[in-house]
Amino acid sequence: MKTLYEATSTAVGGRSGHVKSEDGPIDFNLSVPKGMGGDGGDGANPEQLFGSAYAACFGGAVQSVAKSKKIDIDDDAISISATIGFGKDEEGGFMLEATLDCFIPGVDLETGEMLVNEAHEACPFSKATRDNITVTLNLLLDE
């Protein structure tokens, strides 16, 4: 891989600690959700961070695919919601799952499905999770 960009972040104190990016925009406390036995404090958690990053990256992949196919979409109106589930597998180990709800205004079903499926092939987060966790893709259409 030819590296185009690197970002470094550090977590101190695990799930109930603190995260900070080397260059500063990320700098906040973490909290363990009540559903995982924590206090449910006002800090973020790794699943929220992962979901936010995956949603943003996937939205960029949708934009990139649309541009390469010369499909006119409103980049600012694309909305990707990532729901990250945390649970246990059959062996008692911990696992993640992801559901991506994709809203691309102004496209028909066929175009939307093509954009979402090709974005899933192109997105680095999708590549990183492929064959590791279950990822469900949903296309939400204009009503």
Image: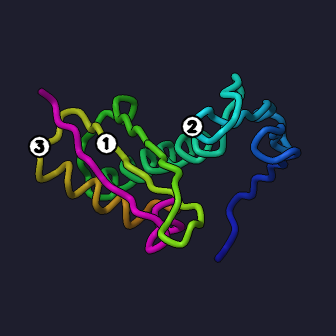
Judged from the image, the secondary structure of the residue bearing numbered disc 1 is strand
Report the amino acid beneath label 1: Cys
Report the amino acid beneath label 2: Gly
Q: Which residue appears at 23% of the width and 48% of the height?
A: 71
Specify the quadrant that holds the N terminus. bottom right
Nearest to the eye among marks 1 and 2: give it: 2
Q: Which residue appears at 27% of the width and 38% of the height?
A: 104
Q: Are marks 1 and 2 in contact (CB under 8 Å)?
A: no
From which residue to which does the magenta span run? Answer: 125-143
**Image quadrant of residue 142?**
top left
Residue 134 located within the stretch drawn in magenta:
yes
Nearest to the eye among marks 2 and 3: give it: 2
Q: Label 1 to label 2, Cα distance in Å?
A: 26 Å
Q: What's the mark number on residue 108?
A: 3
Report the amino acid beneath label 3: Asp
Q: Examine the rendered structure and indicate whether residue 56 appears above or below residue 106.
A: below
Q: Which residue appears at 58% of the width and 45% of the height?
A: 47
Residue 20 located within the stretch drawn in magenta:
no
The mark that comes first in sequence, 3 or 1, is 1
In this orientation, which residue lies closer to the viewer: 47 or 59? Answer: 47
Q: Give the residue pinned by disc 1.
A: 102
Q: Give the residue pinned by disc 2.
A: 35
Q: Which residue appears at 17% of the width and 36% of the height?
A: 141
